[in-house]
Image: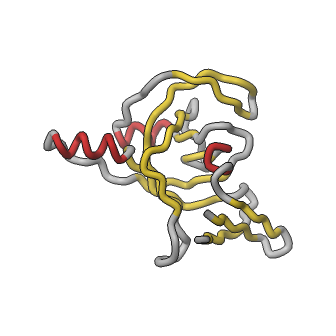
Amino acid sequence: MPRLTFPFAADGLLVPAMVGLATPAMQALQARGHPLPRLVRAKGMLDSGSTVTAVAPWVLAQLNASPGATAPTQTASGNVVVRMYKISFTIHPLVRGGPTLFRRDWSVTNLAKDPDDVDILFGLDLLHQIVVTIDGPAQSFTMDF
C-alpha cells in the first residue's frame, strides 16, 4: 500500500497538492483544440469537518472550472447548500519521487471565500478512501492508500 508522510503542522494536517480540471473536461477541451489550463499548486488540509472536499474560489477561477448542480453538505458551521465542480488532484510528497495520491474525476464544492492559509480542504469523501495515522509525539502523519 503506498504511503505519504508529512509533518504535523500547528495549523493542521497540511498536504501539498496540484489541482486541475477533471480528466473528462480536459479531454473535451483537447478534442475541440482548446488550450488546457495549467495545473494549480495548492496548499491542502485534511478536514474531517466537511463531508465534501472544498476548493478556494481563486483555484476554480484559475482553472475556469464550470459549476454543476447544487448539493447539501455538512461543514463546521452546519448544513449548507453548495455548488459542485469536477476537478482532478494530486497529493504529492514533499520531496521528489515516491508515491502520489491522484484522483482524475473528483466532485468538490467551492469555499465561500478565499482563505488566507489553505486552498483545498480534503473532506470525508477522501478520508473514507485512505488510512490516516497521526503520530503526535513524532509530530507527523501518514496517508496510506
* Quadrant containing the N terminus in the rendered view: bottom right
In percent of the image, x 73 and y 65: which residue is there?
Answer: 8
Q: Is residue 24 left or right of residue 124?
A: left
65 is higher (above) or lower (below) than 30: above
Q: In which quarter of the image is residue 142?
A: bottom right
Residue 68, position in %: x, y?
A: 43, 26
Q: Depth check: 62 or 65 in front?
A: 65
Q: Depth check: 16 or 143 in front?
A: 143
Residue 49, position in %: x, y?
A: 74, 40
Residue 52, position in %: x, y?
A: 61, 38
Q: How is the image coloured?
A: secondary structure
Q: Depth check: 113 or 143 in front?
A: 143
Q: In which quarter of the image is residue 53?
A: top right
92 is higher (above) or lower (below) than 34: below
Residue 6, position in %: x, y?
A: 66, 69
Q: Is residue 114 left or right of residue 125?
A: left
Q: Depth check: 16 or 3 in front?
A: 3
In percent of the image, x 25 and y 48: which residue is there?
Answer: 36
Q: Residue furthest left?
A: 33
Q: Which residue lies furthest to the right in this view?
A: 137
In percent of the image, x 68 and y 38: which residue is there?
Answer: 50
* Quadrant containing the C terminus in the rendered view: bottom right
In percent of the image, x 51 and y 26: which residue is there?
Answer: 83
81 is higher (above) or lower (below) than 86: above
How many numbered dots are placed on residues in this image? 0
